[in-house]
Image (cartoon, grey):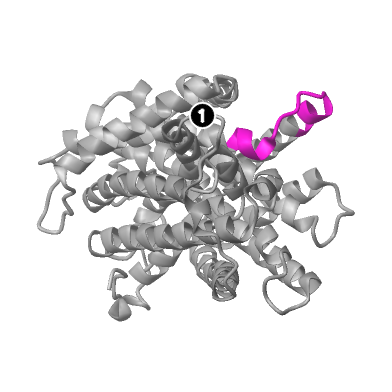
Amino acid sequence: MLVADNTTQDHAAEFDDDGLKRSITGRLLFFYVLGDVLGSGIYVLIGLVAAAVGGAFWIAFAVGISLATITGLAYAELVTKFPQAAGAALYVNKAFRSRPLTFLVTICMLSASFAAAGSLATGFSGYFAEIWSLPPALFVAVVFILMLAVVNFIGITESVVINMLMTFVEVGGLIIVLICGVWYVAEGKADFARLSEFNADGSPTFAIVAGVALAFFAMTGFENAANVAEETVEPAKTFPRALIGGMLTAGVIYVLVAATAALTVPIDTLAESDTALLEVVKSGILPVPTSIMTTLFAVIAMVAITNTTLVAVVTESRILYGMAREDVVPGMFARIHRVRRSPWVALIFAAAVVIGLLGVGKLLQEAGVGVDVVERLALVTVVFTLFIYALVIVACLKLRGTSDSGETFRANTALLWLGILGNLVLLGYVIYDDPTSLLWCAGLLAVGGSLYVAETVFGHREDRNATDDEQPDPTSGA
């Protein structure tokens, strides 16, 4: 079984000195990964992928899953060496010892998470409108982000348990879609030739690459798990199996659901819908009133999106916290609430940036620019993460032989080189196909630049490792 068995550790929860609390078992981590990956793309972006590829868009998910899993192997190896918060930025810092490069990766990772949260919040408001169309979409998205910040403030254990419960709900929604597919096939209505149809606007190869560029967003959640390594019980044992197991499970579900959608709903309908999976339920395949199924599935979809966005909020705060302890961003982000043991300053800052992105998207829409906020922020996320993934794999290869132990996981070297090539090729295509995404990337990097200036001008070593008790972290050597 791919999920680590931690039954003897289920009640283990200790503080790592005065830092974050170790309370996430392998089983919880598996659902953390599964829930994060499942909710992001399949509920929000499936229509855009279908528009890019055609009926064979399930292939784009399969290719994206394969490339992301190779990258996941590098993360698994690095986490077993350095089980600390901050993820990619920490690994690059360890490998290259370059503060400017580490800072760049930190801001890229944060920006990717900010953009992903904004895209998902917008997707959430779309499903919410299926139930109650009265509140403005922007208001719904902003309240959504604020509520998740509050949940995260309450505590990481509570956040991960909620994540696991929501994972069961979102898997239930995908099972409903699969049941629709099985029912449709059993009635003899399925045309399997659709699964090999490509968009007539270009070659199949470029259609798949375009689809992978969007489908890759669906798999970008897995790296968020690395940012809770400092809060995981025995990460060297639990992390590799939980991470890869969660990714592969999500991948199989993605391919099956994509194939089901292609079989049961016209591709044009999927492509034009902001809630594409809901179209499968609305098609009336099952002998249940469509109105009931529509409401039920909209609620499930909102739970799924909530699940992924909650993990994004966790990630943003943990990156800021971890890199504040590494002297990369201002020390105030390392402050932990005295009672809840949560990085509260980082949480406030992260929520403010995501809300700012939503506001900018709304202003551009009102100005008649015609920005699809979901697609735009998804592509911005992909640009940042592809760059980071390639760099993380390079860091993994460079750190071979460093901090190794008998428990260190070792990824296949040939696969890692293939991962570097795949990430860079896909990054080049995304930028070539949509260069305007770089403008959004530049705006987010500018926010990060302000943090760099603040740290350079006002940073003091003794503040970077202090909690709200104003005591230095004993692990810092202060």
Mark 1 neighbour class, 10 Å CA radius: few under 14, some 14 to 19, many 20 or more = few
Write the residue at 69% across / 56% down.
147
* Magenta segment boundaries in residue numbering: 362-377
Write the residue at 51% across / 19% down.
453
Q: Say left or right for 241 vs 170.
A: left
- The kind of residue tagged 1 is Gly
Write the residue at 34% across / 28% down.
424
* Rendered image quadrant of residue 355: top right
Q: Is residue 366 above or below residue 13?
A: above
* Rendered image quadrant of residue 447: top right
In percent of width and height, residue 172 lies at 57, 72
Q: Is residue 366 magenta?
A: yes
Tag 1 secondary structure: loop
Q: Which residue is mark 1?
A: 202
On the question of residue 307 being in view, the answer is no
Q: Is residue 441 above or below residue 198?
A: above
Write the residue at 60% across / 25% down.
440
Q: Is residue 457 magenta?
A: no
Nearest the eye: 471 or 180: 180
Q: Quadrant of the C terminus?
A: top left
Nearest the eye: 475 or 152: 152
Determine the residue located farthest toward the right in the rendered image.
134
On the question of residue 347 being in view, the answer is yes
